Amino acid sequence: MNAIRGEAKVTLADGRVLHLVRDFNALAVAEEACGSNMQAIGASIAKGGPVMRFTRALFFGALQRHHSEISLDEAGDLLISDGAAIGAAMERVAEASAVQDAGGGRKGSARPRTAKTQKTGAPKAGIGTRSSLRGAKKG
């Protein structure tokens, strides 16, 4: 499994194993399924707003790469019957994909961050050569 993209497996009470994937396509499916963008979904969840439709949409999106035969309604039914296990798996998926967003690389960039740009994006003091701009001492 690819932890950077955000993947996890969950075993349901009936023995089925679901492979969940959180990537760009999964998030787009989730937005479409609930009729809201990811900012609205995140903000609503953070302030304790209507979480059920967003949770179902995020789970449904995460199912689509490997389990596209599962409908939105069936995803909701699975959340009722196996909510604790699915919730734990969805947390693992979110945490794994957040690693990439937070420090493993820049959103929209395939180039990983280096130690030089890890925190601020600017070079650390004392790295490189002196500026050639006016006022810089030569030598």
Image (cartoon, rainbow, N blue to C red):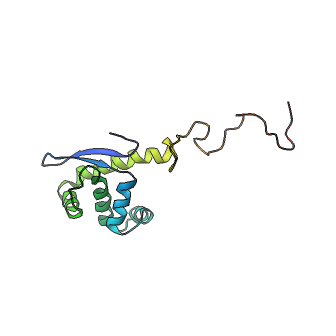
Q: Quadrant of residue 29?
A: bottom left
Residue 45: % across, % down:
38, 62
Pick whichever, 20 or 64, lies toward us.
64
Q: Is residue 50 visible?
A: no
Residue closest to the far left: 14
What is the residue that sits farthest to the top in this orientation? 139
Q: Quadrant of residue 27?
A: bottom left
109 vs 80: above or below: above
Q: Residue 58: x, y in percent?
A: 32, 58
Q: Find residue 132 and report its horizontal and vertical position in percent.
A: 82, 40
> What is the quadrant of the N terminus in the image?
top left
Q: Is residue 119 left or right of residue 9?
A: right
Q: How many marks?
A: 0
Quadrant containing the C terminus is top right
The percent coordinates of residue 8 (x first, y second) are 30, 44
Q: Is residue 88 above or below residue 129?
A: below
Residue under the image location 36 percent in, 69 percent down? 35
Q: Residue at x 79, y 39 (%)?
A: 131
Task: Specify whether 118 is left or right of 65.
Answer: right
Report the side of 11 relative to 109 (left or right). Answer: left
Observer able to see residue 100? yes
137 over 49 or under it: above or below: above
